[in-house]
Image (cartoon, helix red, strand yellow):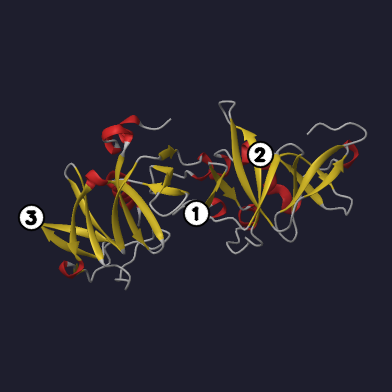
Amino acid sequence: MNTDDNGVTAWLLQVDRLVNVAIGQFELIHIIDKPDYVSIPQAPEYCKDVVLWNSNIVPVMSLASWSTSDIQADNTGVVAIVVYEDDQGGHKFGGLKLSNAPVQAKVTNGQQCQLTGDFDKWRKVSLSSFKSKAGDIVPIIDVSKLFSRVLLS
Amino acid sequence: MIDMQFKNKLRREDEKFHVSILSFAGIELIVPQSEIASIESIYELETNQGSEKYLGVIHKQGVKLPVYCFSKSMDIYRSLPQDRFQCVVLRHDDLMFALLCFEITNAVISDIEFHNLPICMNNNIVPLTHLCLYKDAESARKIGMVTNAVCLNEYINKLK
């Protein structure tokens, strides 16, 4: 997400009661309400489900479950379908479980901040971060990295 | 890239795939029909009192075969749940073992598309070779979980 003085538009995704993350405007392509999950046995708890979307089998990530290790963290059943580029330069789709419907926000260079304290863990999957108008730290997610093997290591 | 050896194993005439669908605890595993050696009566099961991974044994052609029973998340059950009515013997070369299922259904599927497991969930523990999209007799396209005897055996060996 490159910003200029006027800022750029990002999607804010609420992944649990306390944490919002951001992705680029064109990375979110669809919202599914209460999808039919297929649970994959023995898959990581934070990514145990897939959904069928537009003839694609889409892995669905629970960032709430990953960030808090709380297996009950999944909540409303809203899933954001995101698009990313894989290692071979192809387009792939992923799903993110959300607590609420996504909202758009303008983000400027002046809002940039460091990931500190409780947010340290997010460095692994973040491009950068900023402070929201309410003063909360918001990691900007590297969607390709999120759906790579990085969380498995 | 789908393993061609795997595809060839399932493939029969005109791109039709002969599969068996093992149902238990609300999940369905799709295995090559060629790997189903037999379906035994659950009454043949000699349950095991020890702490082994297998729930018990059955005797087939003078050999004791371990019988495994899995939960929805493919954790090992060490006591017999009430919803298992069939004992399916899987075979691959010399490898032979049995799984307890609610039901086994044979199907010939022509409209099936195999997909690798998404890399973000492939922790080398998941007991599946692939996911697939297919149409069964009753439904629109659905997601299937594909496995085989070798994959299941490797999974069982990894379990503590």
Q: Is residue A122 left or right of residue B71?
A: right
The residue at the point 60 percent across, 39 percent down is A93
User: Residue A87 sits in which quadrant?
Assistant: top right
**Quarter containing the N terminus of chain B:** top left
Marks 2 and 3 sit apart, C-alpha to C-alpha, by 54 Å
Mark 3 closeness class: few <14, some 14–19, many ≥20 residues within 10 Å: few
User: Residue A82 sits in which quadrant?
Assistant: top right
Q: Is residue A55 visible?
A: yes
Mark 1 closeness class: few <14, some 14–19, many ≥20 residues within 10 Å: some
Residue B9 location, x and y as percent? 27, 36
Q: Secondary structure at mark 1?
A: strand
Residue tagged 3: B61
Residue tagged 1: A38
Residue tagged 2: A143
Residue B125 location, x and y as percent? 41, 48
Q: Secondary structure at mark 2?
A: helix
Q: Is residue B8 above or below residue B121?
A: above
Mark 2 closeness class: few <14, some 14–19, many ≥20 residues within 10 Å: many
Task: Kindly check if marks 3 and 1 are in contact, taking CB atoms under 8 A apart as contact.
Answer: no
User: Label 2: chain?
Assistant: A
Q: Report whether mark 2 lies on the same chain as mark 1.
A: yes
